[in-house]
């Protein structure tokens, strides 16, 4: 019984660690339009784990 609980506990920990390292800010659609610099308030790069790199 203790070994089953240990295995389940380790499984839950490994799942939670996997979800916490997943990127939150990814771009799924992109635009090639140019923006005026006056309209840009901030720029941030997408997470390295995203399928495509981009700036937001």
Image: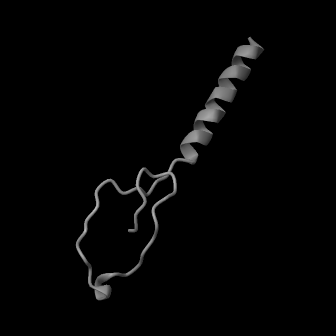
Q: Nearer the viewer, residue 17 or 32?
A: 32
Is 18 in front, or is 53? 53
Residue 40 picture quarter: bottom left
Can you say whether 2 is above or below 19 in the image? above
Residue 54 percent across, percent down from the top left: 40, 63
Quadrant occupied by the C terminus = bottom left
Q: Is residue 33 left or right of residue 2?
A: left
Q: Furthest residue to the top? A: 1
Image coloring type: one colour
Foreground: 2 or 36?
36
Q: Is residue 12 left or right of residue 44?
A: right
Measured along the vertical axis of the image, is residue 56 above or below residue 49?
A: below
- Residue located farthest toward the bottom when viewing the structure as drawn: 38
**Above or below, comparing residue 17 to residue 47 in the picture:** above
If the image is split into quadrants, where does the N terminus sit?
Answer: top right
From the viewer's perspective, is 10 left or right of 22? right
Residue 11 picture quarter? top right
Res. 38 image quadrant: bottom left
| Relative vertical location of residue 15 with respect to residue 42 in this rendering, above or below | above
Question: Residue 34 appears at what percent x and percent y?
Answer: 25, 77
Residue at horizontal 62 percent and vertical 41 percent from the top? 17
Which residue is painted at 40% across and 68% down in the image?
55
């Amino acid at each position: 019984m203790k070994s089953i609980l240990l295995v389940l506990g380790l499984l839950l920990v490994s799942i939670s660690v996997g979800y916490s390292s997943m990127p939150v800010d990814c771009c799924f659609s992109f635009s090639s339009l140019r923006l005026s610099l006056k309209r840009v308030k901030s720029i941030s790069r997408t997470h390295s784990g995203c399928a495509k790199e981009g700036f937001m």
